[in-house]
């Protein structure tokens, strides 16, 4: 029962003042005016009156946050129209809003929503206009995953900061708050008002395939402080922060995107290790908390994922921790939540568990109708829906969306990717680079003694919106610092022939910088480093993702941890190598010995300097 009718076309430029006033008159009249950053406390009586006038389908729609393809709300490219028809049964974002009355839309780079800041602002305005012009139209809460580091949906020329583990290495609450403040201001300027960040998971498992450097670290007290600081930054800029992934995703070796992880922590260990960052987020006034698609038998032995667990979401999060903000699921397209139940049951069970927002179901029509049917047949009460709709409307009101749903191109120009913001990101990054090995005081590298530098190593796909590849970015940054630098990509699994080529090139250089990426015992990266060291040339390793690489590089004379291969972190590492800044980062996780994981090689807090 998909609607395949032709939608209206046209541009999504910011609506005229007349259109804006007409579209928002009803909703604006119902709510008090708000300040520029965050609205005053919402008037529940007026919000409840809004809920009472909504139809049941409109209430169901408010609970969904959906993806949609295209750079424009009304005139996307034909390929995006085709993708929308195939996956959602609508042609455009405007048709999505009209058919399902969705309360939220999530932006992705792969969905072609985030080409550049001015286009993003136009898309946001087009979505708001489409929703507000409907009968009883409400503003849409537009969200994205902008964690910074390796997960970012909005790239250059927006400001990109170091990721969480790098910030954890810096250890500065002020820097975490600055990140949130600047990133929040830029997202808000583009019409994005809910950010699925910060990650509140305490990453104690080096083999964690899904969190890793997305976490601030392995010390729950340090993670808690940085989570609270980042929340304050984001929400002070008028963007809802989202602590994730409750009740904690930091100790798993299964990726919940593709499998169903189990956390074996006891209740006592969970209280001591996983809970503190979420408690800190709640104390900081966090606007939303995202659920995890994993099982924690000590908290609920039913076999259900936390996303569908009433004991976890209502019993612990709502009642024990006292949280009454918005609870949003992680993507309902992930395998971790689809293992036990069908896609029609998952949204219903999530709502019964205590969820408010249902994020990105694989089949929106199926999910939407399943919730509608559950209410009509009495499995869910309309009063239960009203609770969640009211929480969502409270958040929209608190963010000022009823008063000011649109953004301006002038605001984008004033705010996004400004020189001051970019400089702030560079300063934060300089405080994160961690020096782990420096035999014979090889670093800082002297331009006079080692003028010709070869940069080799892994070149994983560049994180969203950064320049890449990492070897090229490092070589470029070293070139700007006065070295003659050449880049040679050797990949994450270099062959014998590739290693031989790198070794031959190293003999023509004065020094070698090698970028490593998740080094394993069986991979070719270890052999590459060993053979480069055997040339007699000074070798500097830069771990561009997990800092654990150093444990498998015993022969390297110098090693830095950059925690990501984004431009801002690679440029900072280059400045440390060249001695323009001193290394100040301290390990936020412990690094175990490669030959005996029970033994710590470098403890939390370790880091050298010049």
Image (spheres, rainbow, N blue to C red):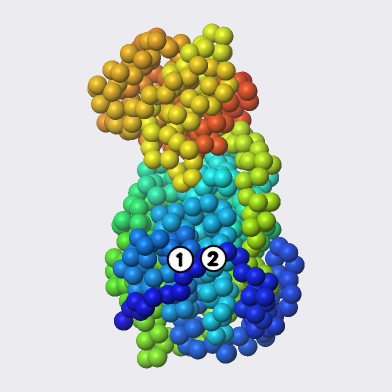
Q: Give the residue at mark 2.
A: 12
Q: Which mark is residue 415?
A: none
Distance between the Cα atoms at labels 1 and 2?
8 Å
Crowd band around label 1 with a 10 angstrom C-alpha radius: few (<14), some (14–19), many (20+)? many
Q: Is residue 67 left or right of residue 217?
A: left
Coordinates of residue 242 in the picture (x, y in percent): 55, 60
User: Which image quarter: residue 192?
Assistant: bottom right
Q: Give the residue at mark 1.
A: 75
Please name whichever residue, 223 or 414, is drawn nearer the observer in this view of the structure: 414
Q: Is residue 286 left or right of residue 81?
A: right
Q: Is 373 located above or below residue 213 in the figure?
A: below
Q: Residue at x 47, y 16 (%)?
A: 453
Q: Residue at x 48, y 25 (%)?
A: 475
Coordinates of residue 474 in the picture (x, y in percent): 49, 28
Quadrant housing the C terminus? top right
Please name whichever residue, 108 or 253, is drawn nearer the observer in this view of the structure: 108
């Amino acid at each position: 029962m998909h609607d395949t009718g032709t939608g209206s076309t046209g541009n999504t430029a910011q609506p005229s003042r007349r259109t804006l006033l007409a579209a928002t008159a009803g909703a604006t009249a119902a709510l008090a005016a708000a300040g520029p950053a965050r609205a005053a406390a919402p008037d529940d009586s007026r919000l409840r009156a809004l809920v009472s006038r909504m139809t049941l389908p409109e209430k169901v729609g408010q609970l969904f946050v959906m993806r949609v393809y295209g750079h424009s709300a009304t005139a996307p490219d034909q390929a995006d129209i085709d993708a929308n028809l195939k996956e959602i049964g609508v042609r455009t974002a405007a048709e999505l809003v009209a058919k399902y009355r969705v309360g939220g839309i999530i932006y992705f780079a792969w969905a072609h929503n985030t080409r550049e800041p001015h286009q993003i602002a136009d898309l946001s305005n087009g979505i708001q206009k489409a929703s507000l012009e409907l009968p009883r139209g409400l503003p849409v809460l537009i969200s994205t995953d902008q964690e910074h580091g390796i997960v970012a949906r909005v790239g250059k020329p927006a400001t990109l900061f170091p990721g969480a583990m790098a910030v954890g290495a810096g250890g500065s609450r002020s820097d975490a708050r600055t990140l949130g403040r600047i990133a929040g201001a830029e997202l808000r300027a583009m019409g994005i008002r809910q950010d699925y960040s910060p990650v509140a998971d305490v990453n104690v498992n080096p083999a964690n395939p899904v969190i890793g450097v997305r976490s601030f670290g392995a010390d729950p007290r340090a993670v808690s402080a940085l989570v609270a600081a980042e929340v304050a930054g984001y929400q002070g800029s008028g963007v809802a922060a989202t602590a994730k992934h409750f009740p904690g995703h930091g100790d798993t070796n299964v990726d919940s995107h593709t499998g169903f992880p189990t956390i074996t922590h006891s209740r006592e260990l969970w209280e001591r290790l996983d809970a503190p960052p979420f408690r800190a987020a709640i104390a900081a006034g966090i606007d939303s908390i995202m659920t995890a698609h994993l099982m924690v038998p000590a908290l609920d032995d039913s076999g259900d994922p936390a996303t569908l667990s009433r004991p976890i979401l209502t019993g612990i999060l709502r009642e024990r921790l006292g949280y009454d903000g918005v609870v949003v699921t992680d993507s309902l397209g992930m395998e971790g939540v689809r293992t036990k139940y069908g896609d029609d049951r998952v949204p219903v069970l999530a709502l019964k568990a205590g969820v408010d927002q249902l994020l990105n179901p694989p089949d929106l029509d199926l999910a939407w109708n399943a919730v509608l049917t559950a209410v009509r047949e009495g499995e869910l009460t309309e009063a239960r829906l009203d609770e969640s709709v009211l929480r969502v409307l409270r958040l929209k009101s608190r963010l000022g969306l009823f008063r000011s749903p649109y953004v301006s191109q002038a605001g984008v120009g004033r705010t996004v990717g400004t020189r001051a913001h970019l400089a702030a990101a560079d300063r934060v990054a300089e405080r994160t680079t961690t020096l782990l090995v420096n035999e014979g005081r090889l670093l800082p590298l002297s331009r006079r003694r080692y003028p010709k530098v070869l940069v080799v190593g892994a070149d994983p796909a560049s994180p969203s919106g950064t320049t890449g590849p990492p070897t090229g970015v490092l070589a470029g940054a070293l070139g700007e610092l006065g070295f003659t630098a050449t880049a040679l990509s050797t990949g994450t699994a270099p062959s014998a022939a590739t290693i031989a080529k790198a070794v031959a090139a190293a003999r023509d250089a004065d020094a070698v910088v090698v970028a490593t990426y998740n080094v394993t015992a069986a991979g070719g990266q270890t052999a590459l480093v060993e053979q480069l060291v055997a040339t007699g040339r000074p070798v500097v390793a830069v771990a561009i993702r997990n800092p654990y690489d150093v444990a498998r590089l015993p022969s390297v004379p110098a090693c830095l941890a950059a925690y990501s291969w984004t431009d801002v972190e690679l440029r900072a590492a280059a400045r440390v190598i060249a001695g323009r800044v001193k290394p100040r980062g301290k390990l936020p996780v412990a690094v175990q010995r490669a030959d005996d994981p029970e033994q710590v090689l470098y403890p939390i807090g370790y880091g050298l300097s010049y």
